[in-house]
Image (cartoon, rainbow, N blue to C red):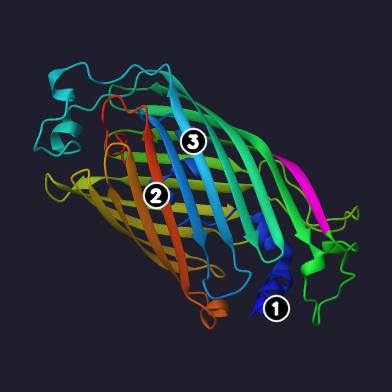
Amino acid sequence: MKSFLFIFFIGFGIKSIAQQKPYYTQYIINNYILNPALTGIENYTDVKLSYRNQWAGIQGAPVTAYLSVQSPIGKKDYRTTATSFEVPGENPRGKSFVDNYTAAEPHHGVGLIIMNDKTGYINRFSAYATYAYHKGISSRTTLAAGFLGGISNVSLDRSKIVWGNLDPNDPAIGIDNGEIKKVKPEIGAGLWLYSADYFAGLSVLNIIPGKAHFVTDKIYGDYFAPQFIATAGYRFFLSDDVTALPSLMFQFVKPFPVQVHLNVKVQYLDKLWVGASYRYSDEFGGFAAMAGLNVSNTFNLGYAYDVSTTSRLRTYTKNTHEIILGFLLNNKYGDSCPRNVW
């Protein structure tokens, strides 16, 4: 099974796993990892820990973990009228909340993302700092612009490769035994338009491209290609206690076709949510079921079960598991879920 996975990624193209950033099923509860413009969007310091075990049962399949931290700076908040306080027994994100919603005061946000993604013998470690500025453009709508900067270190441990029918002299993966590394800067940028019941965003990651090799030969193609992402969602009420948020996302990384994500998330009060996602892609298509619980105004969690629909992989495995733990620090207003959509 290990040989299958390595041959799959080398044969399909070593660049295919590095051009694409790691996959996330639950980005709908942490769009920050895909768009730096969300930095500082909420009233509190938002900390998230995530672990994703992709294609369980295949040895060497992608395993991704990340820590994200982002917080507002200089944000004057919303508790200025009687209607802005939560009323016991009512849905704090119900129709009254939407009716009285106002755009955020101008403020800044700063954040940090630390990520590790391991696929077979290839490991990618990344660390980014983010910044965003939020400004109301109407009484109910805010526009944020954000930037990301950091580094990625991609390493390949040739000493652990079971070569089989592979060519150990393939220059795309170096010729020396042991661990070989490639370090490159990371730059990204994004825009995020949001209100009480909708959002829309654009972002580009990996603005600085790299090459698909671990040696000095420059004949190989793009390794880190820019990734373009567009997303939008709209929230509506099924009742005053139940809301639904359908959303979609388009991803494009050259030379692959555009990948389309269709999502829906249904939330009861500010406590419990369930969701589903369908990812249309020639190579990495899938369907996911998700659920989450806002345990308190300091802790929440989410879980996703992802089923692969890709013909090359479903013979071997269909299962991917992802969990996110969230911590709401310095939450002086006691928010138990995000104010700006969710």
Q: Which residues are magenta?
A: 179-186
Disc 2 versus disc 1: nearer the observer: 1
Question: What amino acid is labelled 1 in the image?
Answer: Ser
- Rounded to the nearest angstrom, the CA distance separating label 2 from label 3 is 16 Å
The mark found on residue 28 in the picture is: 2
| Residue 222 seen in render | no
The mark found on residue 69 in the picture is: 3
Relative to residue 336, is residue 319 depicted above or below? below
Residue 282: % across, % down: 55, 70
Q: Is residue 288 left or right of residue 130?
A: left
Q: Earlier in the sequence, mark 1 or mark 3?
A: 1
Q: Which type of secondary structure does the marked residue at label 1 adopt?
A: helix
Q: Count neighbours of disc 3 (C-alpha within 10 A) and say few if under 14, some if 14 to 19, many if 20 or more.
A: many
Location of the N terminus (image quadrant)? bottom right
Q: Which type of secondary structure does the marked residue at label 2 adopt?
A: helix
The answer to whether the residues at label 2 and label 3 have Cβ atoms under 8 Å apart is: no
